[in-house]
Image (cartoon, rainbow, N blue to C red):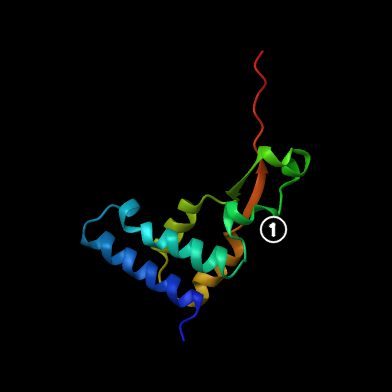
């Protein structure tokens, strides 16, 4: 049975092939971004985004903000992680796992609006 990492590595390989075929990186990586969300964020981390926001850890600023003024964000922008995965050579499940465990963090952050003067 395939593991979550197997699905992610498959998505990376497919994205690399699409990019080599001529798709832009952004176009080629749409399924990879979906795979990261589904198989890493949801299934590995158990953090399902906005629908389960109460279960997602908060930043220090978010702890001080009203619940309505927080939003779910990646600590490291997802596109940076995607680029690192796309450029990874050699591509192995172990290296993908190490990178995702180190960089893929989702947090609730404060969404402070500047008061109009």
Query: Residue furthest toward the bottom?
Result: 1
Q: Position of residue 8 (x, y in %)?
A: 44, 70
Q: Residue at x 44, y 65 (%)?
A: 35
Q: Residue at x 44, y 58 (%)?
A: 82
Give the left or right position of residue 28, taking residue 41 as reference.
Answer: left
Q: Is residue 96 visible?
A: yes
Q: Is residue 90 visible?
A: no
Q: Position of residue 100 (x, y in %)?
A: 55, 65
- Of residues 15 and 50, the one nearer the viewer is 50
Q: Position of residue 115 (x, y in %)?
A: 67, 20
Give the left or right position of residue 53, taking residue 20 as reference.
Answer: right
In the rendered image, the vertical position of residue 57 relative to residue 90, given as above or below: above
- Of residues 79 and 63, the one nearer the viewer is 63
Task: Tell me where residue 41 sits by quadrant.
Answer: bottom right
Task: Tell me where residue 31 sits by quadrant.
Answer: bottom left
Query: Residue furthest toward the top?
Result: 117
Which image quarter holds the C terminus?
top right
User: What secondary structure is found at the residue carrying circle 1?
Assistant: helix
Give the left or right position of residue 30, taking residue 107 as reference.
Answer: left
Q: Residue at x 64, y 36 (%)?
A: 111
In the rendered image, the vertical position of residue 64 relative to residue 15, given as above or below: above
Q: Mark 1 highlights which residue?
A: 55
**Badge 1 local density, few (<14 within 10 Å), some, or many (20+)?**
some
Q: Position of residue 33 (x, y in %)?
A: 43, 58
Q: Residue at x 63, y 56 (%)?
A: 52
- Of residues 52 and 112, the one nearer the viewer is 52
Query: Residue furthest toward the front?
Result: 51
Query: Residue furthest toward the left?
Result: 21
């Amino acid at each position: 049975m395939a593991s979550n990492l197997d699905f992610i590595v498959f998505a990376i390989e497919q994205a690399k092939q699409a990019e080599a075929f001529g798709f832009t990186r952004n176009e080629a990586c749409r399924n990879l971004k979906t795979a990261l969300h589904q198989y890493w964020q949801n299934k590995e981390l158990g953090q399902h985004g906005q629908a389960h926001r109460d279960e997602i850890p908060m930043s220090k600023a978010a702890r001080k903000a009203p619940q309505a003024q927080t939003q779910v964000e990646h600590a490291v922008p997802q596109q940076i992680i995607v680029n690192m995965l796309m450029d990874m050579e050699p591509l192995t499940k172990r290296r993908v796992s190490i990178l995702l465990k180190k960089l893929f963090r989702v947090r609730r952050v404060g969404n402070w609006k500047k008061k109009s003067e």
